[in-house]
Image (tube, rainbow, N blue to C red):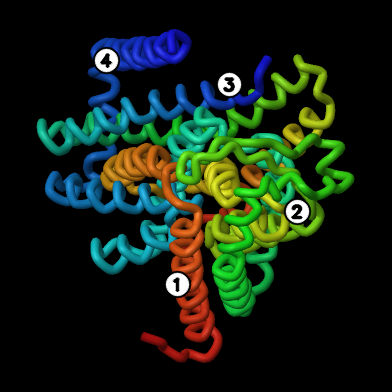
Amino acid sequence: MDVNRVAYWVLFIGMILSEILLISSLILSTLLNLKSLAIILAFFGVGILIATPYTRVLAISLVSFMNRDHKLLLISLFVFVTMMVSLISGLVFNIVPHG
Amino acid sequence: MDLLETVERKKIALIGVFALISILLIVLFYNEIAYLGEAYEGKYVVNPILNLELLAFATFAGFIGAIMGIGGGVIIVPTLSTVFNLPIHEAIAISIVSVVATSISGGSAYVDQRITNIRLAMFLETSTTLGALIGALLALIMPGKYLFIIFSAFALYMGFSQLYSVKGELRKMSAQGFKQIEPDFVSRQLNLSGNYFDEGENVNVEYVVSGSKLGWLASFLAGVGSGMLGIGGGFLKVSAMNILMNVPVKVAIATSKFMIGVTAATSAVVYYIHGAIRLDVVAPIAVGTALGATVGTRVMNKLKVKWLKATFSILTFYLAYAMLRKGLYLIFGIQLP
């Protein structure tokens, strides 16, 4: 399985899903004045957007495993674990922007 | 040609299916969504005119970010806080989401164009994510203000190096010089070398990656800067790959674009869970940067390498100045123009 194609489709699907929701949100708030619906769509759109890089790293790990590409599997798993540790430490230590 | 048409048809079909599913879900769960939205509405104010202004600005930022391989936070944060009068912490949170958006749209386009080196990206992501984690934890126990001066010096060095290496890069491209060196141990083991077709110079460029340890270290520093100071570090990654690792500048830009989403997503998800992202402003910014990045990726490979490197140098000099200004202000209280 071509790791380039898998990475591409994961990013592409993530982009399309999130953009559909965000564009709908933008149209609803700008043209139709449906503010509450617009905000909730933005909430889901941002959620999918942020989840996409995690999914991309995980997908590369999976493809590397299927291709028996152990070196790429090792580095992609390292990246995923570091991302998860960063996420957990961010939540534990409440690291939010303060300027 | 048939294959390309088939892929394009598949993409259009996929977009259609997702759009239909989205509409269906909205119709099915309209009452629940509207109820949740009403709870949010008191918290946020939606302004249609502001939305359009933000969309136009974000499209420009996304375009610049795509052709330079950076996230664009350096453009977005100051503009949101000074022109659109958003508090700086809200501007940073929105900027982080926009970096994810531009990385996904720009990154996918460059992967599709076969310019991105995914193996190199994954190798450097090990150090940049680790650096970001350490930087974020360090920020809890020590101030990072002196780092602004250090990163400013780095940016200045990288800017001059980019200018200095313009002729050398063109020479290497025309004489296939990017493949005339020996790969180092890491590059050989991980099979990091690659090739791409440069539309601006009309030549197929093969390259051999070397200097992996230095590149890994530079990427680690970019991660520390991201975690500690909130700077994206895209300029450091592009320069590290191009100057230290024998990677052509367009591959460096595409690979950096692919990488930056990972560190940004890690910060973004924390802000998202804490409710620090302004949902009334984020949609036009995320849509605009993704749109600008999509256009930028169609342009970048057509540009001449010398113009690309010169523009990148100017941007890096600006970054050096911006970081020096912030560092001097935080350390000595000196306010530069």
Q: Mark 4 — residue?
A: B23
Question: Distance between the Cα atoms at labels 2 and 1?
Answer: 25 Å
- Residue B306 horizontal/vertical position (percent): 49, 59
Q: Where is residue B280 in the image (x, y as percent from the top left)?
A: 26, 44
Residue to which mark 1 is pinned: B318
| Kind of residue sitting beneath label 1 | Tyr
Crowd rating for badge 3 (residues with CA inside 10 Å; few <14, some 14–19, many 20+): some
Place residue B10 in its image quadrant: top left
Q: Is mark 4 on a helix, strand or loop?
A: helix
Mark 1–mark 4 distance (CA, rounded to whole Å): 44 Å
Q: Earlier in the sequence, mark 1 or mark 4?
A: 4
Is label 1 on the same chain as label 4? yes
Tag 1–tag 4 contact (CB < 8 Å): no
Nearer to the camera, B27 or B148: B148
Q: What element carries label 3?
A: helix
Disc 3 with disc 4 on a shared chain: no
**Coordinates of residue B202 in the picture (x, y in percent):** 50, 40
- How many marks do you count on the picture? 4
Mark 2 closeness class: few <14, some 14–19, many ≥20 residues within 10 Å: many
The circle drawn on residue B111 is: none
Q: Look at the image and tell me whether residue B134 can be seen.
A: no
Residue under label 3, please give it. Answer: A5
Q: Report, in whole angstroms, how far the alpha carbon at label 1 lies from the one at label 3.
A: 36 Å
Classify mark 1: helix, strand or loop: helix
Give the residue at x 47% y 77%. B321
Q: Which of B21 and B39 is in front in this view?
A: B21
User: Amino acid type of disc 3?
Assistant: Arg
